[in-house]
């Protein structure tokens, strides 16, 4: 697993929020416009971009509004394969 032991879930959420904000800005959409397009409250969008905190349903609505649903559809679809030694060690 390629996870930094120093990275916290909150850090990952903030980075996700930054990427969503970048997509929004590149599409020249304001937070207020995204709120209308996504049917997610302006406060929720503002909080998400500032802190990374949002419900999964609201994130899905935002992804749909930004035409980024493929990224959500493909989440958790790639997983690493273990070598035989790892499998043997797990089954001990």
Image (tube, rainbow, N blue to C red):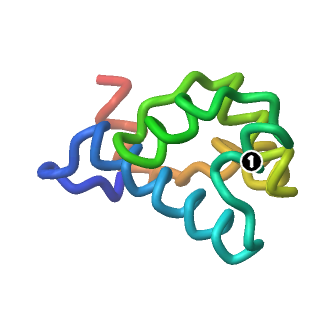
Left or right of 46: which side holds 11? Answer: left
- Residue located 40% across and 57% down the image: 15
Which of the two residues, 90 or 62, is positioned nearer the viewer here?
A: 62
Q: Position of residue 45 (x, y in %)?
A: 57, 38
Which of the two residues, 39 or 10, is positioned nearer the viewer here?
A: 39
Q: Which of the 4 image quadrants contains residue 9? A: top left
Q: Which of the 4 image quadrants contains residue 24? A: bottom right
Residue at the far left: name it. 6
Disc 1 designates what residue? 34
Left or right of 43: which side holds 36? Answer: right
**Up-down: is 29 above or below 54?**
below
Q: Position of residue 27 (x, y in %)?
A: 77, 72
- Residue located 67% across and 58% down the image: 30
SS label for mark 1: helix
Q: Position of residue 53 (x, y in %)?
A: 43, 31
**Up-down: is 56 above or below 75?**
above
Which of the two residues, 26 or 8, is positioned nearer the viewer here?
A: 26
- Residue located 73% across and 39% down the image: 35
Left or right of 55: which side holds 4? Answer: left
- Residue located 74% across and 72% down the image: 28
Q: Quadrant of the C terminus?
A: top left
Q: Position of residue 5 (x, y in %)?
A: 15, 49
- Label 1 neighbourhood size at 10 Å, few (<14), some (14-19), many (20+)? some
Residue at the far front: name it. 32
The number of numbered badges drawn on the structure is 1
């Amino acid at each position: 697993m390629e996870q930094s032991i120093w990275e916290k879930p909150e850090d990952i959420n903030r980075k996700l929020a930054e990427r969503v904000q970048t997509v929004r800005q590149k599409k020249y959409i304001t937070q207020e416009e995204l709120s209308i397009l996504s049917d997610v409250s302006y406060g929720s969008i503002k909080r998400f971009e500032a802190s990374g905190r949002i419900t999964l349903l609201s994130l899905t609505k935002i992804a749909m509004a930004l035409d980024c649903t493929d990224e959500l559809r493909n989440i958790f679809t790639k997983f690493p394969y273990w070598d035989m030694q790892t499998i043997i060690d797990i089954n001990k």
